[in-house]
Image: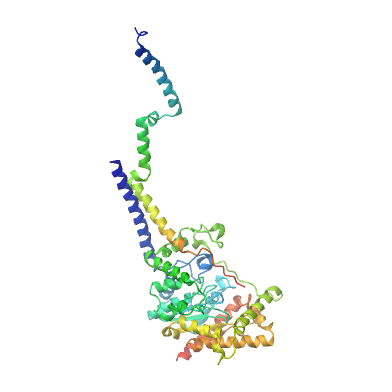
Amino acid sequence: MNKEKQKSYSRYFLLGTALGFLLCTLLGQMLTASPLAVPSFTRFHEYINPNGGFYLTYNEMLAQARKTMDEKPGRKLLIIGGDSVFYGEGQSIEHCWTIDLQEELDKLYPGQYAVLNLALPGTKVFEAGNWVYEKLKREGKNVLLVTNAMPSTVFEPSGTIPLHYMFFDAVERGALDNFAERLSFAEKHKEWSLFQDDSHGESLKLRALFNHYLAAEELWTRFTYYVVGNYYHRSTAAASLLPRRVFKDPFIDRPTFDRTDVEKLDHGISQVRKFLAGITALYEGGKASEYEQFFWRRLRGCTQCAVPASSRDSIIVAITAINPLFIDELSPREKADYLHIKKLWRENFERCGFKTIELNETLASENYVDFDHLNPAGGKLMAKELAARLRDKSNDRK
Amino acid sequence: MTENNPEANEATNKEPNKELNKEPNKAAGSNQELFGDDGKQAQSTRLQELILYKNKWLSLVSGLAVGIFLHYLLFRLTLPTEPFIYAAF
């Protein structure tokens, strides 16, 4: 009798376990379409992006884009993709350059654009913002992507760390075009891929599969945001138990780069030299053109495989300039090499069917906080220039 | 009569001992019966009711908690073990 009772109550335990798991899954699934309730969203700041240990999901980004479209109906959604320069590093959230961009666009083309900053520090040219853009473009939404690529960025069609997981998440959910060249890039082009270990991609695919059907990331990232922090991260440190919603954007308006800071100046110059050497040192003789060299062949391969041809017409790749102070310190020969490589870099995107613009070419060193990031004044100028250039690009299309 | 009866003597000898044995129990705690044969069973039953398998609601709720924890574990295990460190220049 006792044994029977024991057996029956064990069943209740198992039932509870299954029920608990199922409830979590259902709740996660219900939340997939809802954006994080970030008050007056400007960007996914440090505490709600992977740099701060918050691995926001593809759906959370997509939901933010849909929310922006709903808030500003009838406007073209202008997604800002790319890296920390477009993210607005160097500017506080109050002075983020995309706020100025929205104002400039409203002045120039009233009621036409809704700006959404999906750039993140460490993100490459065709990552997060691009994947959101591609989904909306496929749905026939009125959307434009402006993303940046400095001539030193090495990227991969399926994305790189820290947002590599998001690509697989988007693919798993069928949000992206079934673009075979992109999906099989790492396998077909081992010599070009940054991910030589197959298990890296496999584990991310599995992670995406779990998230798709069990919605663990969808639920627990929101739980971390709304209810309570539940893991330690160096960015939140002793406050790791607090929900992420209580954290404010920690970025401040940084001062202009101090030109007497010789150490940083030397470091930046050596970065440019290393970058140049990384391309030209690998040059081999007997090539018909410079494009046949390894670096440029790889760049072209990555660019071709990153975005399906059908989605390229509404993408503008901006080549952002680095602090002229660092360029001025180069020898005339090095400077010529840098400008030449920058020209080839831009041509690469144009040859692959993307519209390109060069931004910040006229900015002075006083507009920079370091090697490539802008202070609030620099951000304002970039916003003004981009807004004006959008008109040019619109005219191009006509 | 009693002096010649060994059984009666044994009985009279045992009585005081029983009482003596009971005293410490009384002194140690109020629920003497808990420690007797019946008491042990009662204690065991109560404990069994308290822990999982004799209380169906507790079983269910505990299971629920474990299910939620497993779901959370799935999330935690997918997070990178090494944080990404973005080094701005």
Q: Is residue A63 in view?
A: no
On screen, residue B42 above or below A204 = above
**Is A371 on the left-hand or right-hand side of A9?**
right
The x and y percentages for residue A207 are 43, 67
Query: Is residue A184 placed above or below B10 in the rendered structure?
Result: below
How many numbered tags mark residues here? Answer: 0
Quarter of the figure that contains the N terminus of chain A: top left
- Report the coloring of the rendering: rainbow
The picture places residue A80, in percent across and down from the top left corner, at: 50, 78
> If the image is split into quadrants, where does the C terminus of chain A sit?
bottom left
Tell me where residue B89 sits by quadrant: bottom right
Q: How far across and down, in percent of the image, does residue A149 sit?
A: 54, 80
Q: Residue A318, how many percent across, how many down?
A: 53, 83
Q: Nearer the viewer, residue A105 or A340?
A: A340
Closer to the camera, A272 or A197? A197
Nearest the camera: B79 or A75? B79
> For this view, does A331 lie left or right of residue A64?
right
Q: In the figure, A59 relative to A269: above or below?
A: above
Vertical placement of residue A300 versus B36, above or below? below
Q: Residue B5 versus residue A342: which sits nearer the camera?
A: B5
Residue reaching furthest to the top: B1
Name which quarter of the figure residue A281 lies in: bottom right
Hey, which residue is sitting farthest front in the picture?
A286
Q: Is residue B30 left or right of residue A359?
A: left
Residue A364 visible in the displayed image: yes
